[in-house]
Every structure is written in C-alpha cells, then in structure tokens.
C-alpha cells in the first residue's frame, strides 16, 4: 500500500511564541539537557495510553499489534537517536496543530514567566517547567517526526531545524511506523553522546524507568532490542518492592515535576470498591497552584488504562497532590463525561480524600518538621477546604497551622491555642490582612496583648472567607479582632501590664460626641476602645458587620456596592486624647484632629486617607500651628 507522495512539503512558520521558545532552546545554557529524552518518552507513552483508551471503543485500532511499546534506536555513526512508539500517531493536520503551536499548558506558563522576566532565558526555569517536544532542539540540529494515525492509511513527516519554520509533507507508508510515531533526532556535534548506549540507558533508568509502557533499546539500527524498562505499573507493586528512588522517579514522570516528593502515599483500597492509589505531595509549589481554574492533577486509570486527568478525583483544595488512582470497578467503556458523574468516582473521591487528610495528620503527629514544610507550601490551598468542605472541616482545622501573636518564628495549632486560653476567654481571636508584619503591629491587637490573649494572624486571601462561615473549634467561635465589641474587660490584664489610665469620662464623652458629629458620614460611631493600650485610635467593624478586611476585599473586587461605615475607637488613656478632651473653644482645631485621627487609623490598616487633599490641608494647618 502506498500513498501519494508527489505533493511538495508545505512550509509553515512557527507561532511567535514557539519561535521564541526554540531560540531559547537552541541557545540554552541549561546544563541538564538530558530532560529532552524524558519529554519525548513521556509523549510516546501518552500516545500509547491514548490508543489503549480509544482501543476500548474501537478495538480495530489495535489491529494485530495490541501491546504498547516504545523503542529507542541509536545510530552513533550517523549521530542519530530515534524514539518510536506504536501509539495513537498523528495525521498531517494533527502535526500542524500540535507541533507548530504550544499545546502544553506547562509550556504556556513557562512562556508567561519568561515574558514576566523580560525575556531572560533563565536555565532554572527550563528545569522547573520542562518544555515538552521542543526540548528536542536542545540536542538536535534537525528533528523529523514520521507518523501514522491509528486507523488511517496515510503517513506524514514533520521536519524542522528549529529556526523559524517547519515543513509537513505526506510520505510513503513504508517511511513511517505501521502505527504511531517515530521521532528522529539529528544530534548536534556536542550532543553526540545521546547516540551512545551508556548515556541513553543511564538516562532512561534514571528518568523514565517507570513509564507504564515497556522501552527497548537498540544499540544500532538493525541490532536486537534490549528491554531497559519493563512498563510494569509501579502502583500495582507491593510497597516493599519499591525503593524511594523508584517513587521519586515515578513521581517525576507521572507528575511532570522536577523536584522530589515531600511525601508519598501508596495503598490499595479494598472493600466495597477496589482501587490503587499512588499520590505524592510535591516538595515545592507547582507553578499553577493559584490558577483560577484550580485544576487537579490526579490521573484516573481503570485497570491500568489511563482514562483522564480531568476527573475530579480529589477536591480542589487538594489540587497540589500529584499521582494517580487506578480503579477496578469503573467500567472501561464508559465515556469520560459519564465517569465524572459516576457514584463510583464519588466514593473513590471520598475515600482518597479522607485517607490523604488522615495521612497528613499522621505525619503532623509523627514528624512535625516535615509536616510544617508541607503546610508552608500548601496551607493556603488546604484552607480553602475549611470553606468548601463542611464535612471535613474538623479534620482540616486539626491540620491547620497558624502564625499568631505568640508563634514567633514557629507555627501554632488550634490545640496549642486552646491549651493557652485565658481565663474567661470565650472566642478564638484572629486578624486578617495581607501582610504579616503589618498585622502583627496593628493597633487592634494592643488590648489582646495586654491581656495575654493570643491572636491568630491570617495573611492569606482565603482566610477572609473561611472565617466567615461560622467556624468554631471546641465550642469556641472564631472572632475577628476588628469586628464589633470584644468584652475584653472580662479577661484580666497580664500581671506585667499596668492598668490603663482612665481619663475623666465626662470630658472624654464630650469629645466622643464632638467627633461623632465632625466625622458623620465617614464613620458609623465613635466610641471608647477596650482594644487599645498604646495607640490613640483604631477602626473596627460593627458587631453585625463583615470583618473589615473581607469588606475591603469584596468592595475592591466590585462585589459590594459600598463598604459599611466603620466604627472609630478611641483610647481614653492616650495622652493626646486626654488633652484633646479638655480643649475648649477650638472647634476648628478639634475637627481637624478628629479627621486626622481617623486618617491615622486608616493608614494603620493599610489604607489611604479618605480624601488626600483634605488630609494634606489639615496636616498643613496643624504643622503651621506647631511652629508658630
Ligand atoms: N509521540 C507522539 N505521538 C503522538 N502525538 C504526539 C507525540 N509527541 C507529541 N505529540 C503531540 O504533540 C503535542 C505537543 O507535545 P508537547 O510535548 O510539546 O506537549 P504535551 O505533551 O501536550 O504537554 P503535557 O505534557 O503538558 O501534556 C502533544 O500534546 C501531542 O498531541
């Protein structure tokens, strides 16, 4: 059988982004060029898995060659390395779509980072992201891809020197694999060692030993092939037979990560449903951790057949976990969409989520330092579960670690917090913000410090949300230090704290009334504070109102028409307030000072004065008075 080969190759220009990427690859100073082989083997394995999946519905695609395989053929004389698979293959149109554009989401993220770094070709970045097919140009002066899509009678060749253009042309069927893809690398002079057995074998063993497709190595084009990786599914082997390196290697190939796993969880669930789980918690934050789509990365297999990595195997707040679940019970011939809605998948999700949280708790109990490393990387994501997963809120609260007015450089658990509750303390106090340093010096904390009451300092955006959903712990509600009254007076001052000086309350009341009037429209009330010991003023939210930080966040996102007016709290023991309270007949000065005090409280909260011009004028008047 032959195809029409007369058509001349069509020349195409790479997408602008691809050209940029290629330029970088070619001029890369990245020392670990070996990664190109992992990328190409992983593409070949993906192609085999895609075929395995399509072969379920259309067994004819597999023909008389049902077993997936990858071969690596070396040609040291010609300086060539060929990677061939009998997977799904590509049509000429597929090649145009996938090998001239950037398909890979990781590569897109890589390009974004590159753009953000003003085009600096940082070799570290290549290592961090991996850049798929194009990494071939780190070692090759020319790349040819011969491919034949399963079930078709046509083959095509893609060819490029990586310098701006590529060609696609139909080729005779004898030039392509009977099914699948052959990638031929014409190696650069300084990359000829990639056509040597020793080098290639070492790299495969180190990087791709656990891809679920067997890999054979041919030392020369016509040599006998040697098996260098058996394609056995690592996750189905007993734990006792798997070394830490095996796990780390598998993690890198399954997760496309370049670090080591911080924690590995491998087990087989037996009972109503049977499935194997092999998951990893990365050691560093993946680049897409805070992408808005919050996509998970667990691959779903059914009896060793890769089905999808889009299924919601884990809740979104566990999206940092990498790995796979292989189910025995899901039917293989179900569409991906139906699988997503299947009760079996729901049961698996429940089981795996519970187990992962349980394992994290075990780690927290047995190796606090290792656990804290995980929390530091992923705590902000796990806390989303406090908001979204009511059923596991207790478990998640148990896992949560916090910075607090007592944590110093360490972290505090709620168990620690509750153990140190002060007499009469009925709530767990917290302050939210986006800057830990500013939070820890905020005036609202003064009264709590004076009473030795610990305040949790919550700097992540998600903290503004979960704290509002009625969370409590051991019967103690969470309460914002900037919200409503505090009843702090019921809690005694610490022994080393002097009782605040109380000013003549009539005079203070008079000033409060004056300030209420002067600041009408800017605050909802002006009142005496229990929170302050050294600062003169602070702003708080009304008792029934939203926490101030959340309100600001929602208002700035346009989700609140207008933030509610705050309450200005005044420290009656503060020298300035005491003096101000007894000033008579100087209403203009007192009004200026009341406004300046309000602006001062806003600034302490990380805000701007409400009217910059009026603020400057008031300050100007005051400074003139001071020097007159
Ligand atoms: N051996 C192959 N067989 C079939 N298709 C391939 C093969 N190699 C590459 N491709 C196609 O080219 C595309 C681009 O490959 P590339 O490695 O750049 O990204 P990717 O594999 O899609 O990325 P990711 O690893 O993030 O999924 C692949 O998605 C696939 O469609």
Image (spheres, rainbow, N blue to C red):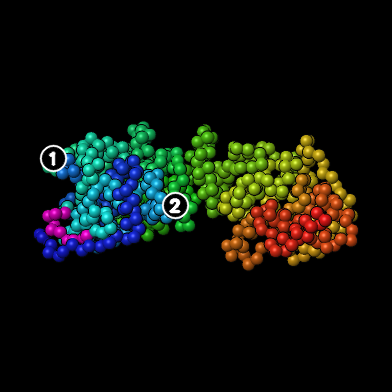
Viewport quadrant of the C terminus: bottom right
User: Few, some or many C-alpha atoms within 10 Å of disc 1 (few <14, some 14-19, many ≥20)?
Assistant: few
Residue in the foreground of this view, choosing between 87 and 595: 595
Residue at image location 64% in from the left, 48% down from the top? 438
The residue identified by callout 1 is 223
Q: Start and end of the magenta stretch?
A: 167-176
User: Magenta segment: does it hold 564?
Assistant: no
Residue in the foreground of this view, choosing between 518 and 344: 518
Residue in the foreground of this view, choosing between 360 and 597: 597
**In the rendered structure, which disc, 1 or 2, sits on the residue that comes first in sequence?**
2
Q: Does dot 1 land on a helix, a strand or a loop?
A: loop
Q: What whole-number distance in Å separates the C-alpha atoms at marks 1 and 2?
A: 47 Å
Camera sees residue 217: yes
User: Magenta segment: does it hold 175?
Assistant: yes
Q: Is residue 58 left or right of residue 480?
A: left
Q: Does dot 2 land on a helix, a strand or a loop?
A: loop
Residue at image location 78% in from the left, 60% down from the top? 621
Q: Is residue 283 left or right of residue 141?
A: right
Q: Is residue 315 left or right of residue 468?
A: left
Residue 21: x and y in percent read 34, 53
The residue identified by callout 2 is 117
Residue at the front extreme, as displayed: 628
Residue at the left extreme, as displayed: 1
Q: Quadrant of residue 598?
A: bottom right
Camera sees residue 83: no
């Amino acid at each position: 059988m032959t195809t029409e080969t007369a058509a001349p190759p069509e020349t195409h220009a790479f997408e602008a982004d691809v050209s940029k990427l290629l330029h970088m690859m070619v001029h890369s100073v990245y020392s670990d060029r070996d990664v190109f082989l992992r990328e190409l083997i992983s593409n070949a394995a993906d192609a085999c898995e895609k075929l395995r999946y399509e072969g379920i519905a259309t067994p004819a695609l597999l023909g008389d060659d049902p077993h997936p395989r990858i071969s690596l053929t070396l040609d040291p004389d010609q300086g060539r390395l060929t990677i061939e698979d009998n997977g799904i293959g590509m049509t000429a149109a597929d090649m145009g779509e996938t090998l001239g554009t950037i398909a890979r989401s990781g590569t897109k993220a890589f390009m974004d980072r590159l753009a953000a770094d003003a085009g600096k070709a940082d070799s570290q970045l290549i290592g961090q992201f991996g850049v798929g097919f194009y990494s071939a140009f780190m070692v090759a002066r020319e790349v040819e891809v011969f491919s034949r899509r399963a079930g078709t009678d046509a083959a095509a060749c893609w060819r490029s020197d990586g310098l701006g253009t590529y060609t696609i042309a139909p080729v005779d069927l004898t030039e392509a694999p009977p099914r699948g893809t052959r990638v031929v690398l014409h190696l650069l002079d300084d990359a000829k060692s990639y056509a040597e057995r020793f080098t290639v074998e070492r790299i495969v063993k180190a990087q791709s030993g656990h891809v679920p497709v067997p890999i054979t190595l041919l030392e020369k084009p016509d040599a006998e092939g040697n098996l260098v990786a058996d394609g056995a599914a690592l996750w189905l082997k007993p734990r006792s037979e798997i070394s830490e390196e095996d796990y780390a290697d598998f993690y890198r190939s399954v997760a496309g990560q370049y670090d080591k796993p911080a924690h590995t969880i491998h087990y087989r669930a037996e009972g109503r449903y049977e499935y194997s789980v092999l998951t990893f918690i990365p050691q560093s934050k993946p680049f897409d951790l805070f992408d808005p789509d919050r996509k998970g990365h667990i691959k779903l297999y059914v009896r060793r057949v890769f089905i999808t990595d889009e299924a919601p195997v884990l809740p979104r707040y566990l999206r940092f976990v990498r790995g796979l679940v292989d189910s025995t019970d899901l039917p293989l011939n179900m569409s991906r969409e139906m699988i997503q809605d299947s009760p079996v998948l729901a049961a698996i999700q429940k089981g795996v989520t519970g187990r992962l949280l349980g394992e994290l708790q075990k780690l927290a109990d047995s190796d606090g330092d290792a656990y804290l490393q995980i929390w530091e990387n992923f705590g902000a994501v796990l806390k989303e579960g406090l908001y979204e997963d009511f059923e596991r809120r207790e478990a998640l609260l148990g896992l949560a670690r916090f910075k607090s007015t007592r944590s110093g450089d360490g972290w505090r658990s709620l168990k620690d917090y509750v153990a140190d509750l002060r007499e009469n303390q009925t709530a767990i106090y917290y302050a939210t913000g986006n800057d830990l340093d500013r939070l820890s010096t905020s005036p609202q904390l003064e009264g709590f410090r004076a009473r030795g009451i610990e305040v949790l300092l919550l700097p992540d955006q998600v903290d503004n949300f979960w704290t509002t959903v009625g969370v409590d712990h051991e019967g103690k509600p969470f309460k914002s230090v900037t919200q409503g009254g505090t009843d702090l007076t019921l809690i005694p001052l610490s022994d080393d704290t002097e009782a605040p000086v109380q000013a003549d309350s009539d005079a203070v009341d008079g000033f409060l009334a004056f300030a209420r009037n002067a600041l009408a429209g800017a605050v909802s009330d002006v009142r005496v504070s229990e929170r302050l010991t050294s600062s003169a003023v602070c702003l708080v939210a009304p008792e029934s109102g939203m926490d101030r930080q959340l309100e600001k966040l929602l208002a700035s996102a346009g989700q609140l028409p207008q933030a509610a007016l705050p309450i200005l709290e005044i420290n009656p023991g503060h020298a300035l307030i005491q003096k101000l309270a007894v000033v008579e007949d100087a209403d203009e000065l007192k009004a200026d000072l009341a406004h300046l005090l309000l602006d001062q409280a806003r600034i302490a909260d990380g805000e701007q004065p409400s009217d910059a011009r009026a603020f400057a004028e008031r300050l100007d008047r005051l400074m003139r008075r001071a020097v007159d």
